Image (tube, grey):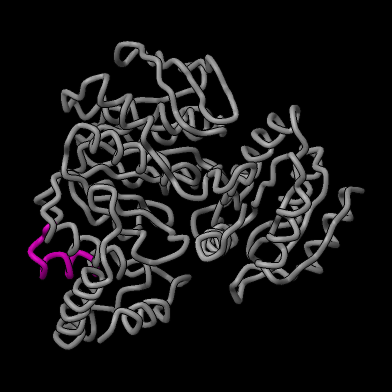
């Protein structure tokens, strides 16, 4: 089998379907010999920011010289991005080897237990491949990002993490997780394990109440991180300097390379989790890890004056609007926007139009069967704004038009991680000044 055939098989595996039981995932892990038990685990759930927290933690551990695996989702350009070892993506050969090893076990179990074992879903299969990859590499630490929810997520088959982290909660995937903040928090809090500490975003009282109650039930120490525990000292168009004073450890000043203020909370949660693990990390190692962290598609500057942001839900758009609005006070802002159909794209567009005094907007269509037409998106922008709107279904044409029309201002490309992935591929294959 080739890498391309393995990728095609995975992509044909159902994604949005009822999950199998965790016992199904554990059956494969058991047949592997439970490699996850031989590594130190960090488990991260949440609606927004969990990928960034994972990346910060991985970067801190690498700065301390640790051998680190990182499992995240989704990928932007290539599926291998979900598996990093010491901040390098796994090769196609390693990916294919893991696929064949896991599928060999899956076929065995399907033959042996046809009535009790089910074929893994898309995410479950990738998680199991990750465990195989990281087990073979003998990583010392493994940072795991949940896929959807927490309680029934495949990653929750792990048994005893060093620390669990729950980032900010928003009303996402309500058809699966519940339609209130408290209900969704309950699903995310399902990753809290007996006696294992949890760090969480304590901004919302209703969310905090649910997480604290679960922590008490699981005899787990809980560490809330709230906005009043940090202070932004300086915010430029390249970096943010801030101080952390949680009361759980000595105060410290941190600098991160980003224009997005929402990353400050994510950084604080990562630093707190690093402290809670009590790994004798030095302050210099934490500073270096925070400074070096790079996370694709989250307020990422890819060309001079061009920023990609994968904001794709209510909270993500709210934070994008804050950042773009702040930067727009000093320079003109233009937009390139696209979205997928299951998102509240009208609500996203309304919030963008109400919150940003943008110069113009170009809408396009993501490369997915879940795309929203450029015509529909353009119609909604005209409904909520009187600024110029242009429609180009081709991502390449839309980007080139937007790039040519941004002038000396900032071009934000936003609305979907599919759009971010397409633009990164485009920028890599073409020369844009």
Marker count (numbered): 0
Residue 88 x, y percent position in the rendering: 28, 53
Please give left or right for residue 327 compared with residue 431 in the image: right
Relative to 406, is 121 above or below? below
Q: Which residues are magenta?
A: 24-35
Query: Which residue does the image show at 69% across and 38% down from the upper left?
Result: 321
Please give left or right for residue 121 compared with residue 175 in the image: left
Foreground pick, 183 / 367: 367
Residue 335 x, y percent position in the rendering: 73, 49
Query: Which residue does the image show at 69% across and 56% down from the upper left?
Result: 344
Residue 309 x, y percent position in the rendering: 58, 48
Which secondary structure class fits the magenta region best?
A: helix
Q: Is residue 193 located in the magenta-colored stretch of the structure?
A: no
Residue 137 x, y percent position in the rendering: 13, 57
Foreground pick, 368 / 300: 300
Please give left or right for residue 68 compared with residue 419 in the image: left
Relative to 129, is 50 above or below? above
Quarter holding the N terminus is bottom left
Foreground pick, 431 / 249: 431
Relative to 174, is 269 above or below? above
């Amino acid at each position: 089998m080739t890498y391309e055939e393995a990728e095609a098989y995975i992509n044909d595996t159902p994604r949005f379907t009822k999950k199998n039981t965790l016992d199904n995932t554990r059956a494969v892990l058991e047949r592997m010999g439970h490699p996850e038990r031989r590594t130190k685990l960090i488990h991260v759930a949440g609606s927004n920011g969990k990928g960034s927290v994972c990346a910060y933690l991985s970067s801190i551990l690498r700065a301390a010289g640790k051998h680190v695996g990182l499992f995240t989702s989704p990928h932007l350009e290539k599926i291998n991005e979900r598996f990093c070892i010491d901040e390098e993506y796994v090769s196609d050969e390693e990916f294919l080897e893991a696929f064949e090893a896991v599928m060999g076990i899956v076929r065995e179990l399907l033959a042996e237990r046809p009535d009790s074992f089910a074929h893994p879903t898309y995410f479950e299969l990738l998680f199991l491949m990750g465990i195989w990859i990281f087990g073979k590499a003998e990583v010392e630490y493994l940072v795991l990002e949940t896929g959807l929810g927490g309680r029934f997520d495949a990653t929750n088959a792990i048994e005893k993490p060093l620390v669990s982290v729950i980032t900010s909660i928003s009303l996402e995937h309500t058809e699966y997780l519940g339609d209130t903040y408290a209900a969704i928090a309950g699903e995310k809090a399902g990753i809290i394990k007996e006696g294992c500490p949890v760090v969480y975003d304590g901004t919302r009282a209703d969310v905090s109440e649910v997480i604290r109650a679960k922590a008490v039930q699981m005899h787990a120490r809980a560490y809330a991180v709230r906005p009043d525990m940090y202070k932004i000292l300086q915010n430029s168009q390249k970096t943010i300097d801030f101080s952390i004073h949680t009361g759980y450890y000595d105060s410290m000043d941190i600098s991160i390379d980003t224009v997005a203020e929402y990353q400050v909370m994510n950084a604080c949660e990562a630093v707190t989790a690093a402290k809670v693990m009590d790994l004798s990390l030095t302050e210099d190692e934490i500073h270096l890890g925070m400074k070096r962290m790079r996370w694709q598609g989250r307020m990422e500057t890819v060309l001079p004056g061009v920023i990609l942001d994968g904001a794709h839900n209510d909270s993500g758009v709210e934070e994008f609007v804050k950042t773009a609005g702040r930067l727009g006070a000093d320079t003109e802002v233009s937009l390139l926007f696209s979205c997928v159909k299951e998102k509240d794209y009208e609500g996203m567009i309304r919030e963008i139009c109400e919150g940003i005094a943008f110069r113009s907007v170009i809408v396009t269509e993501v490369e997915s069967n879940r795309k929203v037409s450029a015509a529909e998106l353009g119609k909604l922008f005209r409904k909520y704004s009187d600024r110029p709107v242009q429609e180009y279904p081709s991502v390449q044409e839309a980007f080139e038009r937007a790039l040519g029309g941004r002038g000396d201002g900032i071009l934000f490309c936003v609305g979907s991680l599919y759009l971010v992935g397409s633009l990164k591929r485009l920028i890599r294959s073409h020369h844009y000044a």
